[in-house]
Amino acid sequence: MNNNIPLPAITRLCSVYQFLLSLEKDGQKRISSSELERRLGISAHSVRKDISYLGIAGGIGAGYEVSRLKELIGERFGFAEQKKACLVGLGRLGSAILQRSSFPGGEFRVIAGFDSNINKLETIKTTVSVFPAYQITEMVRALGITLGIIAVPAASLQEVAGRLIDGGVRGIVNFAPGLINPTVEGVFIRNMDMMAELRILSAQVRVRDEINT
Amino acid sequence: MNNNIPLPAITRLCSVYQFLLSLEKDGQKRISSSELERRLGISAHSVRKDISYLGIAGGIGAGYEVSRLKELIGERFGFAEQKKACLVGLGRLGSAILQRSSFPGGEFRVIAGFDSNINKLETIKTTVSVFPAYQITEMVRALGITLGIIAVPAASLQEVAGRLIDGGVRGIVNFAPGLINPTVEGVFIRNMDMMAELRILSAQVRVRDEINT
DNA sequence: TAGATTGTTAATCGATTAACAATC
DNA sequence: TAGATTGTTAATCGATTAACAATC
């Protein structure tokens, strides 16, 4: 059996998982691939193909049992155990993230915050422990943190990322503009750069409008 | 000539553009596809292929002239004219975005903010004009806003997105968890859901680690 | 000039879509 | 049972990579 799953399929399965959580809350028991297509915009073909990577999921001819499919995805992707995360950069964006960080479902927990500005560490109001930035590597290692969130200015990005990776982080969500570089084998990165997204959107709009001319 | 450009190519070219801006600031005059590969992690093959969608860009055998390539991408994607954007949701995340919204390069300008909470509209400190959420559609239309940024709770997502689209927005950056639905032809959406990104990261880590077992 | 590098066509690779037997 | 829906193989589609002539 080939355990590998293409990234597009992983991404879609995560969307499905998120959607199943809400279905479960609503008390819906079963769902078909065609209804997932309608609700998530993922073709029923892809849904079935993606699920087949996980092994048999359930009732041929009867759709999927919501709780069972959720379990199956969760088990394959290790969503059962709570992951420890940390946040670097406690400016306005960082604080906003921290506030939202009582994550629903409790899959992730931000257990540490870092900032290079000592004043900020003293004045910030949060239940999360905060530390100076030079302690990133040691604290990440000591606390067993596996995920990092970066919300610092672009200039500090490389340094912060390096420290997180040195500490043993396996995944980084990066809000700073710019790319983390060089990428280390086995460490995964997701960039969230609003400016870049706006640029992509306007490019898409422009390209589309030129075709229809 | 086929004007169409695949989305992966658009995305990469936007990264290249962003990188060229910083090169220009540093005063570097020329750059080769192989150096772009090293700096951006995009294969030199892809770089050349992507640029070829734009038409001839420059010196065979001599790399690309930074300013010329920047112009070429900018022209094709319409980056020259400043785009008007608005922000819906003036909570902590929205405020943080607004603060950062003096965007470098001036490609985008947030010219309006919206919130359903009237108190928030009165107390917020910003140079941007703010309006109640029920005026989204009319103000977007009146001001000629083409891009929307959503930073509201998940429950209001659909309604806000609908109003933005009704007003004529062509692109939406969505920070709210959940999908905008149904997607309207010719309106593009980029989702920025940190929770979803964390989930994808842990799934990637898990899948990779199982392969190497 | 010679070495380097592009532009572009061809070949490979991988993902999505289609189709249909299996089965609830 | 019959209609509906999955699981999985095959076919299509599109993007990435390779290769090489053109040319700086």
Image (cartoon, coloured by chain):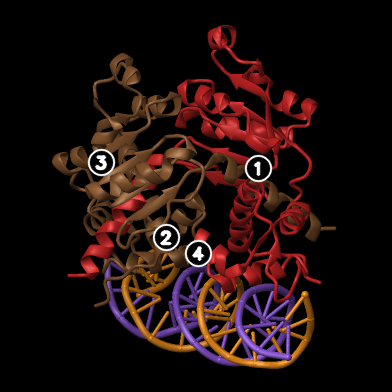
Chain colours: A red, B brown, C orange, D purple
Label of residue A38 in the image: 4
Q: Confirm whether residue A209 shows in the render.
A: yes
* Pick the front one: B145 or A140: B145
Q: Chain of mark 4?
A: A
The lab-note entry on whether marks 3 and 2 share a chain reads yes
Q: Which of the two marks, 4 or 2, is nearer to us in this view?
A: 4
In the picture provided, is A111 more to the left or to the right than C13? right
Front label number (1 vs 2):
1
Label 2 belongs to which residue?
B33
What is the spatial separation of the Cα atoms under label 1 and label 3, in whole angstroms?
A: 31 Å
Query: Quick one: SS at disc 1?
Result: strand
Report the label total. Answer: 4
Classify residue A63 by image quadrant.
bottom right
- Tell me the tag on residue A171: 1
Q: Give the residue number, with chain letter if any, for mark 3.
A: B107
Please identify, in this view, whether the residue under mark 4 or under mark 1 is nearer the observer. Answer: 4
Helix, strand or loop at label 4? It is: helix
Which chain is disc 3 placed on?
B
